[in-house]
Image (cartoon, rainbow, N blue to C red):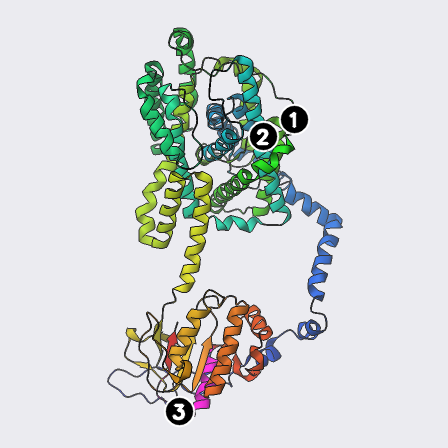
Amino acid sequence: MSGLLGARTCSSPGEASDLKYPLGTRLREPLTEARFQQLFGDEEQVQELPTEPGGPRLCRMWRRPASACSRLGAWRLLQARLPPLRWLPLYRWRAWLLGDAVAGVTVGVVHVPQGMAFALLTSVPPVFGLYTSFFPVLIYSLLGTGRHLSTGTFAVLSLMTGSAVERLVPEPLSRNLSGIEKEQLDAQRVGAAAAVAFGSGALMLGMFVLQLGVLSTFLSEPVVKALTSGAALHVLVSQLPSLLGLSLPRQIGCFSLFKTLAAVLTSLPRSSPAELTISALSLALLVPVKELNVRFRDRLPTPIPGEIVMVLLASVLCFTSSLDTKYNVQIVGLLPEGFPQPLLPSLAELPRILADSLPIALVTFAVSASLASMYADKYSYTIDPNQELLAHGISNLLSSFFSCFPNSASLATTSLLVDAGGNTQLAGLFSCIVVLLVLLWLGPYFYYLPKAVLACINISSMRQMFFQMQELPQLWHISRMDFAVWIVTWVAVVTLNVDLGLAVGVIFSMMMVVCRTQRVQCLALGLAEGTELYRPLRESHRLLQVPGLCILRYPTPLYFGTRGNFRRILEWHLGLGEGGKASPKPDNLPDTVAEPVRVVVLDFSGVTFADAAGAREVAQLASRCRDVGIHLLLAQCNASVLETLARAGVLDRVTPQQLFVSVQDAAAHALEKLELTGSTICTVWI
């Protein structure tokens, strides 16, 4: 039994209790913090800390590089930075190779049309989507820790990058460009997209150096899901001109979604019947195939590659019917063979694209880390968030030299890789082989591919993001706070844009966390007779109370935002109003005993941290209690809180004999102070 007093079985309802003490017979003396450290603390640590307060920390900082310089430390560091050195020797070639090969080829086949489609979202030529489906995947396979993660082009990032590209390199108002002018415009936009990738990669590498992998926690699950769902609506609306064969300028900035809708509705009479027909037929094929892959994923040996089938059929139809010349259907055109020449992005653009690179870096890491963690939990392995920062940072940074735009893990291709039987990062290498074949030899066969088909692929790939809204009823049932965060983020993304919507979502979710610390619920508790259990008084009428004793538990951090609420609650319970006047009753507090409080126990087990303002509030409370003759006891303060209170001067007003390791010890000491031998304890849980 962890308490200091023994427990006796309660008598039956019809019998009178023979307990003389609330908790029965005494077993030991109450333990103060000083006595506990004397009995159970580390003597060496206690002796060393006062003389050299910074010694242990400096030693740890010294030992870390020293251990890294040893052979074993260097090998472990190399294994941590190159994960294949860990998982490749343990690779089960017979059991996993076929699954990785099939999954890699399947994902690679999807990467080809999706890469070209997402390039249109980025406002760059389609071939650069293929580059982004090759280099980042290859780099992540060597550096990433997510065994089931599929990286490459991602619609949300493409949309965000496209907005930045359109702002940095706007299209001339005349829109009647010659071939040379069109090539120059495309080159400038490719350079801007590569600069954004370089900037986001450099930011993630900086976050890795500072070990800021924990930052991914600031993008909560409701924020990420609302962001991707709202961005999917942006993708749908932005592809409407391509579906209808309309040549419209891309809208950027706030309310761009509504501006695009207005422009499309105004231009509907000028839509192309041929491209509208192609779009309708493409969606009629792609959407049912997506549904079949989802519903029969357990029965199908591999998902049906509806995208590549649609690409081949549309290319053959356009070539045989000469749709590009007869009906002016927009086609992909010539895809250059091979790879682009490595080129350093323009560093002069970095100051202009920094505001765009930061949200892209955060979304890249948040989406990738959450996906990697989800599948790591499902298949019982671990990932390293900081190594993920390094992998995605280098992936974006190096791929920008080959004119790639920002990339990350993709929800659709990751799910496809898992369903197809992928087991390790080796599947990414097989995916790269498929894209490599297209870049080197098969590119010319996509010359007659209609761009309307790529727009349909973009829309159909958003299926999973659209269906995230189905989780809203369940989210409302679980947590209405998270539901509010989801709705506010989604509305901000849809009405403003993705960047501002992300900022609004993060700020609002942080405000919700702060508001929860402000809404402290008060429960009146009593001591269950014959036990050490404190239960709400409303649960039973057979709970014990002691006149003159009040135990307060504060289950939230004590900082500048909660100090006012803390003061009001304490003043009301202890009768410490200014000028002798009774303090007004705070909201949601129950009525307590009217007798004056002689001893108060503050249970700080729920106070995870305290800042200077909160510590000063406790110091003032100690002084006020001493002035009015109330004996103050503190229980269960953690080390950091106790250190902050000491620096604020609380220990000058509270002796070590008033600091206890548990509420039970403090309550037993309070009973001795009150010289009571029975009856009840008044406990209030704030």
Point out the image quarter for the C terminus: bottom left
Residue under circle 2?
194
Predominant SS along the magenta part? helix
- The percent position of residue 78, horizontal first and vertical second, equals 68, 43
Q: Which mark is residue 343?
A: 1
- Tell me where residue 582 sits by quadrant: bottom left
Residue pushed farthest front? 174
Amino acid at the residue labelled 2: Ala
Disc 3: which residue: 677
Q: Earlier in the sequence, mark 1 or mark 3?
A: 1
Q: Is residue 637 above or below residue 348?
A: below
The region drawn magenta spans: 663-680
The residue drawn where x is 52% and y is 28% is: 101
Neighbour tally class for label 2: few under 14, some 14-19, many 20 plus, Cα within 10 Å = many
Residue 354 position within the rendered picture, expressed as x and y whole percent measured from the top left: 57, 39
* 361 to the left or right of 274: right
